[in-house]
Image (cartoon, helix red, strand yellow):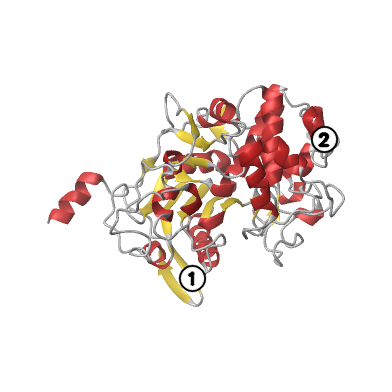
Amino acid sequence: MKALALYAACGLLACRVAAASPDEELLGRKQGYPLAPTLARIHDPAYIVGSFSGMDRLAPSCELAPADQPVPLMSADKEADVRYRFRGHDYTLADYMQHQRATAVLIVQDGVILAEHYGYDRTQHMRMLSNSMAKTLVALAIGKALEEGSLRSLQDQVDQYVPELAGTLYGGTRIIDLLRMASGAKYVEDYTAGDDRARFLATAARQGVLAAAAQVNERADPPGARFNYAGAQTEVLGLVLRAATHRSLCDFVDETLWMPMGAQSKASYLVRESDGSAFAQGGFNATARDYARLGAMLANDGMVQGRQVVARDFLLDMTDASRQPAPFRPGQMVYHGSRYYGYGFQTWILPGDARRFVLLGVYGQAIYVDPKSRLTMVHLAVGQDASGDASGAHLGAERDALWRGVVDRFAR
């Protein structure tokens, strides 16, 4: 009776008595899922849950204010029966939460929360780390800078806005090639301790992003020819935005995207002490419900309550496979030996006849979007490694199967 009373008081979707999540004791349940003592240890199993929902308490950050009048998210009268098939078996969303290290899964259609589950004692009020989902925010900000005229053209080179990079590889790269992860730079980002990403971040932490960008000086391909995923390109886009708009990324995203889309809660960007730059490639933090509002805006082709927050044509440039050069389309683009995904502007494009796309971040972060059905699924997680699959649980594969189940059930 006590559990039933709690359930009724909290409401159907917002306060669920959850089954056990995987590896709870390993991940710090008895200690209350603590923050890491240092940034260097945020991925330690005992600290990853607490740290991924408390990064702006561990590192310098800037805040984004919510909207004066947040866009409401309604809760369905009854949670949707979400089912999916994976490796020959049928499962429910509750099963999924027991299989994978998910901290939050929300499914939203037309502004209605169809399902909302949290793991590891996380709640709707906690700001969760985006990892590379933040890259799509940078692309959206580029679109807003084009709208307001502070950026003239995606064909412009970086050094037209950031003269400090004149004579460097990135300085001579077009903005559109950075958006497509196609600068042509020789750059390895495989999340090992000595990869180019680690070296870039170390230099940026000591000397700033300009110095780190200037260090990338060898081309492997002609610009625009081949996809090569590298967060350094997003950081250079951040430099372009700051120079063109004369505003910090934090302020610009807040003023042009976060508040206009109707965010309910504060968000934050992690900020480098070396140069004050926001961590453009992955340092954004927001609640799961505000990530759902972002996904809902994208699912509605940039429209929020009758207002066009982001130009639909720019969103099509970002997310429509037919608007990408052939080497960047699903089925043709090669990434880690697979041709599954395509890539638009800092956004992954899903295969299939319908336009569907996804914001992805390491350790299991994702926002799936189906514009035709105005459907979005937010997935936040603490995977065992960057891909989420080191444990053999195949997080990415089962997460995609869950999304396919959602599409099968709710797509129009």
User: Which residue, as the protein is rendered here, is positioned at the far bottom?
Assistant: 88
> 315 or 352, which lies in front?
315
Looking at numbered disc 2 in the image, what kind of residue is underneath it? Gln
Q: Tell me: 184 left or right of 45.
A: right
Q: Secondary structure at mark 1?
A: loop
Q: Give the residue number, with chain letter if any, for mark 2.
A: 155
Which residue corresponds to mark 1?
A: 393
Residue 15 x %, y %? 28, 49
Apparent side of residue 21 relative to residue 278 in the rendered image (left or right): left
In this view of the protein, can residue 314 be seen by the observer? no
Write the residue at 52% across / 28% down: 260
> Which residue is drawn at the image coordinates 61% and 41% (left, top)?
205
Query: Can the viewer see residue 387?
Result: yes
Q: Residue at x 53, y 69 (%)?
A: 390
Q: Position of residue 236 (x, y in %)?
A: 71, 38
Q: Position of residue 77 (x, y in %)?
A: 31, 48
Residue placed at 49% from the left, 34% from the top?
A: 61
Q: Image quarter for residue 94?
A: bottom left
Quarter of the view holding residue 18: bottom left
Q: Amino acid at mark 1?
A: Ala
Q: Is residue 272 left or right of residue 237?
A: left
- Decide: is 295 above or below 247: below
Element type at mark 2: loop
C-alpha distance separating marks 1 and 2 = 43 Å
Q: Quadrant of residue 362?
A: bottom right
Q: Position of residue 140 (x, y in %)?
A: 63, 36
